[in-house]
Amino acid sequence: MSIPTESIGSIPRPRALRAALTEHAEGRLAEAELTKLQEQATADTLARLEELGCPVLVDGEQSKPSFATYPLAGLATLAPDGAVIPFADGHTRQLPRLTAGPFRYQVHAETYVREARRHTDRPVKQAVIAPSALSLLYPAEPIDGYPRDVFLRDLADEAEADIRGCLQAGAHSVQLDFTEGRLSLKLDPSGTLLDDFVALNNEVLGRFGEDERNRLGVHTCPGGDHDSTHSLDVDYAELLPRLFRLKVGSFYIQLASEPDPERVLRIIAEHLRPQVRVFVGVTDPISTTAETPEEVRDRVLLAARHIPVDQLGTCDDCGFSPFADDTSTSRDLAFAKIEARVRGTELAARALGF
């Protein structure tokens, strides 16, 4: 295939795993039993993606509580009343609040890479949370004895270790999830918060060499949870110029669910740097029906009118179940959409003469 195609990260968990997570949270299931089910779900996810012809696999985040909070599991210095993220349908997600330092990841994503590689010899991409998202853990009022600037230094060190560990564990590539980028413009339309996010992420990314950064990417979307979004109403024109300042080799950009995708493609083309690849979203995880390969093909061909084919890739708009309790999309529907993306990308490549 001349046009690469990749999943973003999360795949809906099997019903048995979702039930086990509830039982474990209620103290009715041992940790070892939960781990066994998570390993089985990871192996099944990788096998099904391989059967669909995916050139790069993901573990589907079967062992993560969420795409954002996996580093925090077991961290004792947290309170539940952190930043609240409102979604368009009225539901919310709430982050925890840091109460004391020093801040340290309790889980590093390299553990997921090592587990995935036990089950496949195919290339495996690992999604990690961007440090900018975890910066929201620090409260508005300073923590006694642990100022914000010290927290940010600790956070940058931990985020670097998270990414570097994945690369050293054999990840084909590492993708930073940056859904808070678009959201930041809703929280602060001046763009100051977004500039701070980009600066923090670049502080971490700048610690890697050029060859390493070519294996790093950033994903942006307006959020996708329980078939709703948190920032689809924010104009991409305010985000994308700043997004492309990030020091990575690949960008994964939600596009299929945009009301005017061609306008977004024009903005991408205007700010696209040489040697950078853009993976455009060609399937919408929030839509309740699977796209056809022909629909995907047409979306790829539209993108190819604005982005050089040697800099073009395809992806899903976002993960299908970024929080473990999200049951809005079935596992089978997610795989049907992924199959359409793989087949539709192949059709587009043929239409373009490859």
Image (cartoon, rainbow, N blue to C red):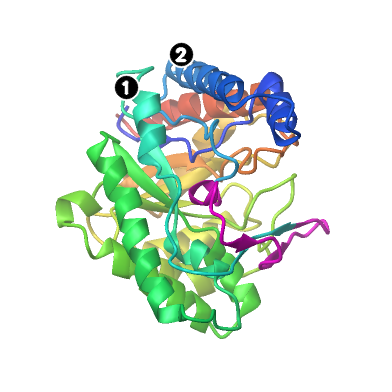
What x and y, as percent, mark residue 77? 56, 61
Q: Quadrant of the N terminus?
A: top left
Q: Can you see residue 13?
A: yes
Q: Which label was assigned to residue 122?
A: 1
Task: Inspect the image, locate mark 1, and give the three-letter code of the amino acid beneath it.
Answer: Arg
> Which residue is label 2 attached to?
51
Q: Is residue 219 rendered to the left or right of residue 36?
A: left
Task: Write down the region rendered in magenta.
Answer: 68-92
Q: Can you see residue 55?
A: no
What x and y, as percent, mark residue 26? 76, 34
- Comparing 79 with 344, the one in front is 79
CA gap between label 1 and label 2 equals 12 Å
Main secondary structure type of the part rendered in magenta: loop
Mark 1 or mark 2, which is nearer to you? 1
- Comparing 25 with 56, the one in front is 25
What x and y, as percent, mark residue 201? 37, 66
Tell me: residue 15, above or below residue 145.
Answer: above
